[in-house]
Amino acid sequence: MNYLAHIFLAGDSEESVLGNLMGDFVKGSIGNGFHPEIEKGIRTHRKVDVFTDSHEIFRASKKLMSPERRRFAGVIIDLAFDHLLSKNWASYSDDDLGNFIRDTYALLDRRKAMLPERFRLFLPRMIEEDWLGSYRTLEGTAIALDRISERLRRRFHRENKLRGAIEEVESNYKELDNNFNMFFPELISFVEDLKIAEQAEPRFSPVR
């Protein structure tokens, strides 16, 4: 899943939102340098990614992509599902999407000192270009996909087939929409079960 879904799944805690967004920027061992709720959010992000990547509906959605773009199918579906979350927002949240996005930007700006350096560096651009809000339209999602394509081109010094991949979403739109609305409630339940399990974990007092 992409940024919008991870934020939605994080819940109301500011630290949880930060952790769930930081998941892509903290590699390997998490260590003990984070607030416990941020650490928990990073772990939730990772578990959401594993659940998503292994889910039969997500894998079936990836298979809808054309052979020439199959290697980028995961990226395409991640962004397509954020677009579909925006499109179907009222089915999953009573909050206004615009207010939700503005509150997220305000949180990130207010607590940017806690973000990993790479995240902190692109945050102004993320807010200025309204990355979260851009998923509401296919045009905005197309720009996001092309932005990733350009980033990969600069990193690996060669062209790739990701540019223009919005056509894959458009040509499979109805099936992707159906797939998302079957998959996302299961993902919500998965995260709710994680939270219940965490609350049930015993808390031991240090031995004196």
Image (cartoon, rainbow, N blue to C red):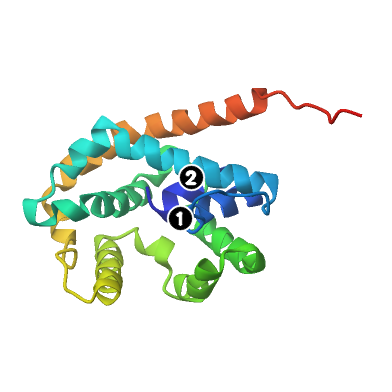
Residue 123 at x, y percent in the picture: 51, 71
Q: Secondary structure at mark 2?
A: helix
Of residue 200 and residue 127, the one placed in the foreground of this image is 200
Residue drawn where x is 61% and y is 69% of the image: 109
Q: Amino acid at mark 1?
A: Asp
Tell me the kind of residue under disc 2.
Answer: His
Q: Which residue is mark 2?
A: 45
Q: Are marks 1 and 2 in contact (CB under 8 Å)?
A: yes
Up-down: is 49 above or below 159?
A: above
Residue that label 1 marks: 24
User: Between residues 32 and 66, which one lies in front from this camera angle?
Assistant: 32
Name the residue at 17% across, 40% down.
175
Name the residue rendered at 48%, 73% in the picture. Answer: 122
Could you tell me which quadrant the C terminus lies in?
A: top right
Query: Quarter of the image holding residue 164?
Result: bottom left
Q: Is residue 49 left or right of residue 80?
A: right
For the view shown, which residue lies furthest in the left direction? 67
C-alpha distance separating marks 1 and 2: 8 Å
Q: Residues within 10 Å of mark 2 (few under 14, many from 20)?
A: many
Q: Is residue 12 visible?
A: no
Instruction: Please tell me which of labels 1 and 2 falls first in the chain.
Output: 1
